[in-house]
Amino acid sequence: MESPLTPLVHRVAAGEIELSVREWPGEGREFLLVHGLASNACTWERVGRNLSARGHRAVAIDQRGHGRSDEPESGYGFDEVTSDLRAAIDSLGMQRPVIAGQSWGGNVVLEFAARYPEATSGVILVDGGFIDLSSRPGATWESISQQLRPPNLIGTPRPEMKQRFHAFRPDWDDEQIEMQMGNYETLADGTIRPWLTLEHHMQILQALWEQKPSQLCEKVTAPVLIATAEPQDEERRKRRDEELARAAAKLRQVEVRHFEGAHHDVHVDQPDELSQWILDALERGFFD
């Protein structure tokens, strides 16, 4: 269902900073697509194309500190990142878009919908939004900060990083690999480094630790679609189901779909299936 549409890549004002966006044209509904922690807007490439091919406008955004967006020294909590989205929506001239977020991006758009109910007509959580780190048995900030601390990839040759992705996801094609390679800046010597610095990564993780998604769900008035991946082990599956149940029980209108065989990056792993599910929901009036 893909089209050859190439997105318009440009920057928009978001308060005192500018954010980089990838925009596909359309006269139908508007979609704002938000990536996860240490990720980038390119991961929404095929979903954005699919939505645009069906006549809808789609905009994927690099959040602050990520990709080609500005990298302020501070402001990586939910107050600031949701304010960024609100300002970007105004700069883009969008009218109550459906907002999709993956992983931490799901938690961002959930918080956005709770804070700015007038600014969105629907929410899509892609294996995120229900992530509740502090609810995990025995979890402390110290343990979580160690478990989820990112590996040091600075200085890795770009071809080696691509090969790691190929080994990790052997079923992905070159475009899917490049979507993920957008997480890194390529330096003059041919090595890579993450666009998101370690300091800012940990600030975001701290904010995620402090967030209580189930409490936010009580404030969300927009209809919500939740797409979940297939956890790799039984412990993760149980944890996902518990977090998901707590969140879904508080939402006013919600539908959940488990994407069989999908990895955490559902929007990269199964973009056509995810796009079609969204389009089907749109057609039957779920977001009306």
Image: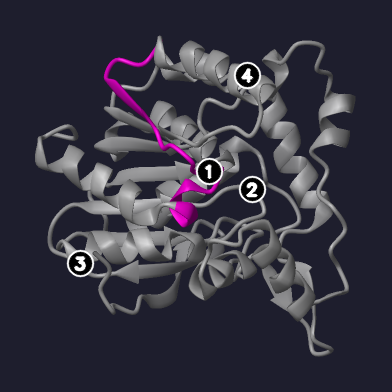
Disc 3 is placed on an element classified as: helix
Q: What element carries label 2?
A: loop
Against 279, is 88 above or below? below
Q: Does the magenta stretch include residue 264?
A: yes
The answer to whether residue 235 is left or right of residue 104 is right
Q: Which residue is at 36% across, 52% downward?
A: 32
Q: Mark 2 points at which residue?
A: 37
Mark 1 touches mark 4? (CB < 8 Å):
no
Element under disc 4 = helix
Mark sitting earlier along the chain (1/4): 1
Which region of the structure is painted magenta?
Answer: 250-269
Q: Nearer the viewer, mark 1 or mark 4?
A: 4
Q: Measure the C-alpha gap from mark 4 to mark 3.
A: 36 Å
> 104 or 272: which is nearer to us?
272
Amino acid type, label 1? Gly
Q: Which label sits in the foreground, 2 or 4?
A: 4
Query: Which amino acid, by three-letter code, is at mark 2?
Result: Leu
Q: Can you tell which mark lies on residue 53?
A: 3
Amino acid type for the residue under numbered disc 3 = Ala
